[in-house]
Image: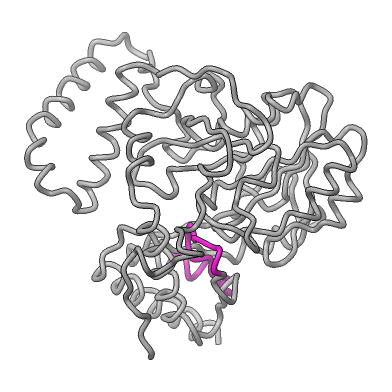
Amino acid sequence: MPSVPVLSPASFFKRGGQPLPSLLDAGAVRMVTSGRIAIGLALREMGIQPGDKVLVPAYHSPSMIPPVHWCGASVVFYRVRPDSTIDIDDIAAKLDGSVKAVMATHFFGFPQDLRSLRALCDAHGAGLLEDCAHAFFGHHAGTPVGSTGDYAIGSSMKFYPIYEGGCLVSHRRPLSFPLRSAGPGFEAKAALAALETAFAHGRLQGLRLALSLPLRLKGALWNALKSRRPAGSAAPALAPDSSDSSFNFDPRWVDKRSSLFSRLTVRFASRARIVALRRRHYLLLQQSLDGLPGCRPLFPTLPEGACPWIYPLLVDQADAAAASLQAAGVPMVRFGATLWPGVDAATCANSVALGRQLIGFPCHQELRAAELERLRAALRRALGATAALAA
């Protein structure tokens, strides 16, 4: 098996001497607490009102829908192709005077060509919301992510080691609305949760030792506060539940900015390193899975303009494989396995098939060589065994 060359982050991926474009370079930016909050803000800025319709891909995260309902609008789902790209003909058939916005998602960090959709939206007077939750970095044929839509949203949590974070970006419109801190409790929660996650994964061990006593005191204080609350009363939320993988939309976070810890991490982390290592890890996973029966990559190649969120793999016996991988402790994502109620094969057969078959695996920049090799070996064992049982 040929090896993937090990190159420095600065040289592994260069485009015209410059790192891969970032969503934050696309225009005016507001750093918020999640991508779904950014969706709500984008629709609000577009003037979406009760009675309006918003087109959303039938293949989606359910967290994309509540922000539309928060604006009082209704959702119309459009079809996607087998590789998750937009079905432009279905969008054209659904565009009418009541459709005021269209969401288009760059799934898994693979930027789509949105030029024809941009022209279609312009012709019908509809806004275009570019969903870059999976694509914080990238371009398609030289067009940077986030620069085609009237607004674009991102999820910095998916690319940086932070507990909360998202962004609203606009290449075409000013972003003049104010944001404020959610308070000292939120700021402390965001920083400590990010550090505790790092400690749980064996990172920053020196800092973990230095903070062991303060963290124990924090736990004791929090338990004491909980014991003093009246029975049945809930603790106030210090952070949005989007940080805990729910699909809810809490409007109390609409006017809140991302924490200082998260904003500083996004500002000072090396973009070149993130892109280089994610691409390298993706290629190593692809190399490991090449030729395994019963599975195939969603995208046969890694385009030069892509910085992957995860490695999306289509698996014939996905449920059995996922159970085996879970038992082996392999982290994975089943994106689209749960769709909004009512979305079925009649709505879009490709979306249902993607949700059933796709398993995503991490290619995070912080994966160590030994961790990546264990992941590769576990995938080969589990997927090989699943394919053998199905044969």
Question: Which percent across, then down, holds residue 220?
Answer: 14, 24
Q: Is residue 373 left or right of residue 178?
A: left
Q: Is residue 200 left or right of residue 349?
A: left
Q: Nearer the viewer, residue 290 or 322?
A: 290
Tell me where the magenta segment starts and ends, as one range.
Answer: 304-324
Identify the residue at horizontal 89%, vertical 32% (top origin): 98
Q: Is residue 232 above or below residue 100?
A: above
Residue at figure coordinates x 82%, y 37% from the top left: 126
Q: Is residue 18 above or below residue 74?
A: below
- Residue drawn at (49%, 37%) of the image: 166
Snapshot quadrant of residue 243: top left
Looking at the image, residue 211 sits to the left or right of residue 350; the answer is: left
> Is 323 one of the magenta-colored residues?
yes
The answer to whether residue 377 is magenta is no
Q: Is residue 113 left or right of residue 279?
A: right
In the figure, residue 153 lies in which quadrant? top right
